[in-house]
C-alpha cells in the first residue's frame, strides 16, 4: 500500500499561512505542503478541501492545519451522511461540484454575516451566476488568512455532522452559510451581484428587529492574491496577482529518458473577455497549443543537456502587439543559451507570426511554463 497502508489514498496540497516555519529546511518558493488523505476522506478532499484542511487542524490542535502527517491515523470523515451538500455535489461521479470564487470569504460577527468578494473576481462570480438555477445560488468560500478562527465540520461516530470552532482567539469565521430568501430578494441579489453593488439581506421576523440578523455582500477593491510567491523563470519577474491557467498537455514529448511538459500559462497582459486582444476564444486556445507544441518539439533533442545543466523549469514569454511580435525564453532567471534560442527561432517564429492581426487589437503578453522531468515509464 501507499506509504505502508492500503488506506492512504494520496495528498491534499496546501500552502503555509499562519503556521510557524522556523527551523524547517525549505526549498525556494514556490512550494506546497502535502497532507496525507485517508481513503474514506477522498470525497471531502475532492469536493470540500477547505473543510478537510480545517478538520485536520482541529484534530491535531494546529491552526489552521498541521504541516506534518500521521500515518495509519483514523479517518476524520466516513460515509457522506445527511447533508445539503449531497444536493450540491455529485459525490458518486463528480460530474458537478460546488464552484469556488477566488478570494470570496465569509465573516461572522454578532447578528451580522459579511460575504466579501474582490472586484477582480467578478468574472468568476458571473460564471457561477450563469450556471446556477433561478432558485439556488451556491458557491464555496476561500480560507480567510485575516481570520483568527474558523467554524469547522465534525462528523460524529453516528455519522451526524456537528459544528465546532478552531481558533487562535475567539472570533469564529465560516466556510459555509445557507440563507433562505424570497424569489423577489433572490432577483434583487442577482442583479446586485451582476452590477457589482453591495447588498444586504435582512433575516428574521419583521416585527422583531432586535432578533434580526443581516447578511451583507461587500465588494472589495483589494485584489485577490493569486500565485503568491511565484516568479518567472525567465527574469525573476513576480507573478503575484497575475492570473494563470493550469494546462493539461494532450501529447507527450520524450527523448533520451526525459519528458517535457507544458503545465501553465500566465496572462501578463490581455483583455479579460478576450475581446480585441484575441477576440475568438477558440482561436486563442488553438494558438497557445501550437506555441507550446512548437516549443516542446524544438527543445526535445536537448532535454538531457538542459536538465543536466539545471534548467528543468523553463519559461516562454510571447508578446503580440500591433508594432511588434516576439518571444523570450529562459530558465533560472537567465535567457536560454544561444544554441537553444536558435533552435526555438526556427520553429517558433513562423507560429507566432501566423496569428491574424485585426484592427483595434490590444497587446497580448502570455508566459508559458514548462518542466523537464524524468521519463519513468
Image (cartoon, rainbow, N blue to C red):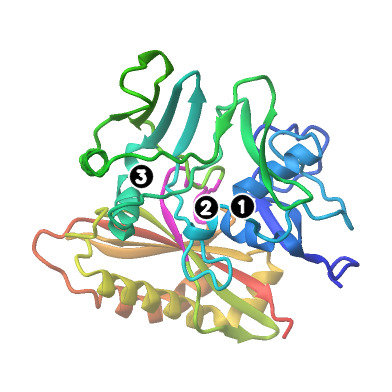
Please rate how many residues cluster around mark 2, counting C-alpha atoms within 10 Å: few if below 14, some from 14 to 19, many from 20: few
Residue 28 at what x, y percent from top left? 68, 47
Q: Earlier in the sequence, mark 1 or mark 3?
A: 1
- Relative horizontal placement of residue 33, taking residue 264 as reference (left or right): right
Q: Which numbered disc, 1 or 3, marks the residue closer to the eye?
A: 1
Q: Is residue 242 magenta?
A: yes
Q: Which residue is mark 1?
A: 49
Q: Label 1, label 3: how many angstroms apart (C-alpha)?
A: 20 Å
Q: Which numbered disc, 1 or 2, marks the residue closer to the eye?
A: 2
Q: Specify the quadrant of the image occupied by residue 183.
A: top left
Q: Which residue is mark 2?
A: 84
Please rate how many residues cluster around mark 1, counting C-alpha atoms within 10 Å: few if below 14, some from 14 to 19, many from 20: some
Say above or below: 140 vs 349.
above
Task: Report the magenta residues as a range.
Answer: 230-246
| Quadrant (top left, top right, bottom left, bottom right) of the C terminus | bottom right
Q: Which residue is mark 3?
A: 121
Q: Which mark is residue 307?
A: none
In this view of the protein, which residue sits in the foreground, 28 or 243? 243
Please rate how many residues cluster around mark 3, counting C-alpha atoms within 10 Å: few if below 14, some from 14 to 19, many from 20: some
Q: Which numbered disc, 2 or 3, marks the residue closer to the eye?
A: 2
Q: Earlier in the sequence, mark 2 or mark 3?
A: 2
SS assignment at label 2? loop
| Quadrant (top left, top right, bottom left, bottom right) of the N terminus | bottom right
In this view of the protein, which residue sits in the foreground, 201 or 150? 201
Say above or below: 4 vs 254.
above
Residue 67 at what x, y percent from top left? 77, 44
Amino acid at each position: 500500500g501507499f506509504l505502508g497502508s492500503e488506506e492512504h489514498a494520496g495528498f491534499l496540497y496546501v500552502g503555509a499561512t499562519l503556521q510557524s516555519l522556523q527551523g524547517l529546511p525549505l526549498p525556494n518558493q514556490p512550494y506546497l505542503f502535502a497532507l496525507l488523505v485517508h481513503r474514506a476522506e477522498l470525497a471531502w478532499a475532492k469536493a470540500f478541501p477547505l473543510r478537510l484542511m480545517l478538520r485536520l487542524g482541529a484534530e491535531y490542535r494546529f491552526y489552521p492545519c498541521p504541516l506534518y502527517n500521521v500515518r495509519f491515523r483514523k479517518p476524520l470523515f466516513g460515509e457522506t451522511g445527511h447533508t445539503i451538500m449531497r444536493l450540491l455535489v455529485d459525490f458518486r461521479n463528480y460530474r458537478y461540484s460546488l464552484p469556488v470564487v477566488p478570494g470570496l470569504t465569509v465573516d461572522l460577527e454578532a447578528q451580522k454575516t459579511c460575504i466579501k468578494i474582490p472586484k477582480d473576481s467578478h468574472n468568476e462570480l458571473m460564471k457561477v451566476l450563469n450556471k446556477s438555477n433561478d432558485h439556488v445560488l451556491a458557491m464555496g468560500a476561500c480560507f480567510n488568512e485575516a481570520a483568527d478562527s474558523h467554524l469547522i465540520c465534525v462528523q460524529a461516530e453516528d455519522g451526524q455532522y456537528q459544528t465546532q470552532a478552531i481558533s487562535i482567539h475567539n472570533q469564529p469565521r465560516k466556510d459555509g452559510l445557507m440563507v433562505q430568501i424570497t424569489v423577489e430578494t433572490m432577483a434583487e441579489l442577482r442583479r446586485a451581484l451582476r452590477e457589482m453593488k453591495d447588498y444586504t439581506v435582512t433575516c428574521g421576523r419583521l416585527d422583531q428587529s432586535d432578533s434580526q440578523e443581516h447578511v451583507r455582500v461587500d465588494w472589495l477593491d483589494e485584489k485577490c492574491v493569486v500565485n503568491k510567491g511565484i516568479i518567472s523563470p525567465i527574469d525573476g519577474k513576480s507573478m503575484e496577482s497575475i492570473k494563470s491557467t493550469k494546462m493539461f498537455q494532450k501529447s507527450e514529448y520524450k527523448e533520451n529518458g526525459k519528458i517535457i511538459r507544458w503545465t501553465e500559462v500566465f496572462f501578463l497582459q490581455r483583455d479579460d473577455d478576450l475581446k480585441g486582444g484575441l477576440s475568438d476564444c477558440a482561436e486563442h486556445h488553438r494558438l497557445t497549443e501550437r506555441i507550446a507544441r512548437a516549443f516542446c518539439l524544438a527543445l526535445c533533442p536537448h532535454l538531457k543537456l538542459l536538465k543536466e545543466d539545471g534548467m528543468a523549469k523553463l519559461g516562454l514569454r510571447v508578446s503580440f502587439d500591433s508594432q511588434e511580435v516576439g518571444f523570450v525564453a529562459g530558465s533560472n532567471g537567465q535567457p536560454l543559451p544561444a544554441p537553444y534560442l536558435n533552435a526555438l527561432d526556427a520553429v517558433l517564429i513562423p507560429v507566432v507570426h501566423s496569428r491574424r492581426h485585426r484592427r483595434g487589437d490590444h497587446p497580448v503578453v502570455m508566459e508559458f511554463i514548462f518542466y523537464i522531468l524524468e521519463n519513468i515509464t
